[in-house]
């Protein structure tokens, strides 16, 4: 597998992609990353444009294809910021470890 499977995305965009693949909404992504909802939305739009995709489901499929070990598998009892059941989400540190630092 490629050394940098998340390319052409930035590490942050890849992290957002992982959260999309976990089923989070833009608002939940914003809460999870402590960013504004508009910033989360911008990240999603950039991901779609860079990958030439039209739907979030396509982003989730792309993440599963390029980094299958990095996609959360879902753990009973884990919660989204709104309290609903969700897959475990990666932290920024976990994403940085998975994708490495970029110049």
Image (spheres, helix red, strand yellow):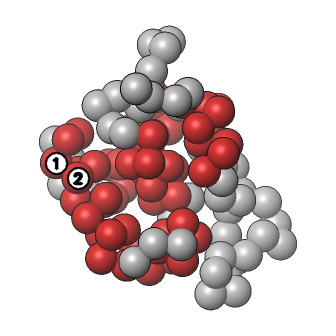
Residue 17 screen position, x and y as percent? 43, 50
- The kind of secondary structure element at disc 1 is helix
Q: Residues within 10 Å of mark 2 (few under 14, many from 20)?
A: some
| Of 38 and 56, the residue lying toward us | 38
Residue 58 vs residue 91: left or right?
left
Position of 53 compared to 6: left or right? left
x and y, in percent, of residue 10 in the image: 37, 39
Residue beneath the point at 44% across and 28% down? 102
The picture quadrant where one finds residue 75 is bottom right
Q: Which mark is residue 46?
A: 2
Alpha carbon distance from label 2 to label 1? 5 Å
Residue at point 45%, 13% (across, down): 2
**Numbered marks: total:** 2
State the residue position of label 1: 49
Examine the rendered structure and indicate whether residue 9 appears above or below residue 59: above
In the displayed structure, 40 sits above or below 16; it is: below
Q: Quadrant of the C terminus?
A: top left
Q: Are marks 2 and 1 in contact (CB under 8 Å)?
A: yes
Say left or right for 16 vs 82.
left
Say which residue appears at 55% left-offset and 27% top-offset.
100
- Residue 54 rendering spot, x and y as whole percentages: 18, 54
């Amino acid at each position: 597998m490629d050394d940098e499977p998340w390319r052409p995305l930035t590490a942050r965009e890849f992290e957002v992609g992982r959260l999309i693949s976990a089923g989070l909404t833009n608002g939940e992504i914003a809460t999870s990353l402590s960013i504004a909802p508009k910033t989360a939305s911008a990240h999603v739009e950039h991901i779609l444009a860079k990958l030439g995709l039209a739907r979030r489901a396509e982003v989730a499929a792309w993440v599963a294809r390029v980094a299958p070990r990095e996609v959360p598998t879902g753990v009973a009892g884990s919660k989204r910021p709104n309290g609903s059941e969700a897959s475990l989400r990666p932290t920024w540190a976990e994403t940085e470890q998975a994708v490495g630092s970029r110049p």
